[in-house]
Image (cartoon, helix red, strand yellow):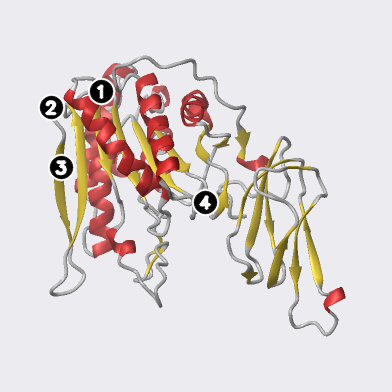
Amino acid sequence: MSHTVEKIALKSPAPGTERFLTVHRFGTIGARPKVYLQAALHADEWPGLMALNHLIPMLAQADKAGRILGEIVLLPYANPIGLDQRIGGAMPGRYAFDGAGNFNRNWPDLSTAAAAHIPQGFTGDANQDIPTLREALRKAVAELSTRTDIDHWRAQLLSLSIDADYVIDVHCDQESLAHLYCHISHVDIAKRMAAAGDIPIVLLEEEAGGFSFDDCNAGLWRRMTGLVDKADSLPMACYGCTLELRGKDDVNDVFGQKDAAGLMHFMIAEGVIDGEASDLTGPDPFRLDEVDVIYAETGGLIAYKAEVGEYVKEGQLIAEIIDITAADPLNARTPLVSRTEGLFFARVDLRLIPAGEGVAKVAGRKPLAHRKKGALLEA
């Protein structure tokens, strides 16, 4: 089919206002593989907006040439609710003002609802069972509550993504190298994506926790075990990833063009788009429990002593927190050190920080006892 653009109306939060999602479709509806891409689920993260803005004309050209073999659904912005947040000229964009919390947490676990639509169980044949589960998931999404504007928005996104083979949720960190998260079972796909997009860091999770958007789509495939007969034979037929395109300020046409080209290369390699892909080996991945997340126990002014992209040693000074209330500035600094040897790949963009702030992330090669399973990189 030709490139089409659809606008999906969202529930209005108040009289006289309206919101909508813009949905670009390429290829043939129902064709496989199906790819779903979205940017700025956290509405204050904009590198993905630039990347998908560059990707759309590339896909339109490929579609016009008949090169889209599967189906591609692309949302150039995923969260008009967050985009509408303004306080004193700043856009918070990360948390819902109605108390629903982080826009990328607590997405519904659809496994139980989908199981109710498969009373006969699976056959043990993936070729039959994968379409069966996808149909059940579509029914489960249709049953989701749409009571609030947040509920309705979430249901609309999931109606577009839940039956995809690939769900690519594009985010960014604060100041960081490009990196991506995915489940450990999808390591080979993630390495190809990283190679295609020149992404130096792949982070693997066994149980991410938090019910992020990508895990809502991909994780339910493994959560079907025990809910439906023969579900243990199911493959994880949805690759879901969170793609972090560097830091918040890395928004320019050079990066946008590069990131879009990387996504095109990846989709060619995966057989979604016709074309030739070079060998995609990818970097050696890291596990989440090998990443040191360094927190500040006290608040104050931060002075970094290492730079993003630097390879650091265990015990190396990463930053100092300065107590600006101290009588003696020479004795007012609290050191923050890395508890592993590895790549310093992300840091907070604030320079005056509160106590408890996550300051830096270092990806190493040894499991760290203090890391909590199922807490993403938040503990």
Residue wearing tag 2? 1
- Asked whether disc 2 touches disc 4, contact meaning CB atoms under 8 Å apart, the reply is no
Asked which quadrant contains residue 19, the reply is bottom left
Residue wearing tag 4? 247
Q: Residue at x 36, y 37 (%)?
A: 167
- Asked whether disc 1 touches disc 4, contact meaning CB atoms under 8 Å apart, the reply is no
User: Is 65 or 237 nearer to us in this picture?
Assistant: 65
Residue 110 can be seen, yes or no: no
Q: CA distance from mark 2 to mark 4?
A: 36 Å
Badge 4: residue crowd in 10 Å (few <14, some 14–19, many ≥20): many
Residue wearing tag 1? 32
With respect to residue 347, does 218 lie above or below? above
Residue 264 can be seen, yes or no: yes
Spot occupied by residue 222 in the image (x, y as percentages of width and height): 43, 33
- Asked whether disc 3 touches disc 1, contact meaning CB atoms under 8 Å apart, the reply is no
Query: Mark 4 or mark 1, which is nearer the start of the sequence?
Result: 1
Spot occupied by residue 319 in the image (x, y as percentages of width and height): 74, 59
